[in-house]
Amino acid sequence: MEERVSIEQTFEQLDELIRQLESGELSLEESFSAYEKGLGLVKQCRESVDEVEKKVLVLDESGEQHEF
């Protein structure tokens, strides 16, 4: 069973990849690898946000809950 990484942890990983890419110290091959990994992390973030949005409940004016 694969453990799910939190959105915060995924953002931290993305921040680190961005720092590495912006440093200019990676080779071209390493840069492409980091970019591909970043795209995967962005996809994970989108999926996590979509899951959360489906679970969010909104209170209407009468105080009743409705799914978002």
Image: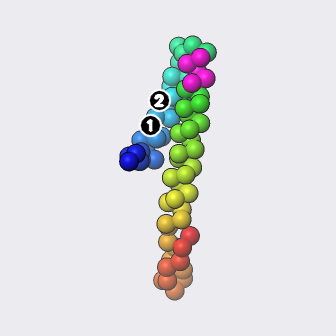
Whether residue 39 is visible to the viewer of this picture, yes or no, is yes
> Can residue 31 be found in the magenta stretch?
yes
Work out how far the residue at label 2 is from the one at label 1, CA to CA, in angstroms: 6 Å
Please state which amino acid type lies under the numbered disc 1.
Glu
Nearer to the camera, 3 or 49:
3
Q: Position of residue 7 (x, y in %)?
A: 45, 47
Q: Is residue 29 above or below residue 5?
A: above
Quarter where residue 22 is shown? top right
Residue underneath mark 1: 12
Q: Where does the image place residue 54, in percent across and percent down from the top left?
A: 54, 65
* Image quarter (top left, top right, bottom left or bottom right) of the C terminus: bottom right
Identify the image quadrant of residue 40. top right
Disc 2 is placed on an element classified as helix
Residue picked out by circle 2: 16
Q: Which mark is residue 40?
A: none
Highlighted range, magenta: 29-33
Residue drawn at x 59%, y 28% is 35
Count of numbered circles in the view: 2
**Amino acid type for the residue under numbered disc 2:** Glu
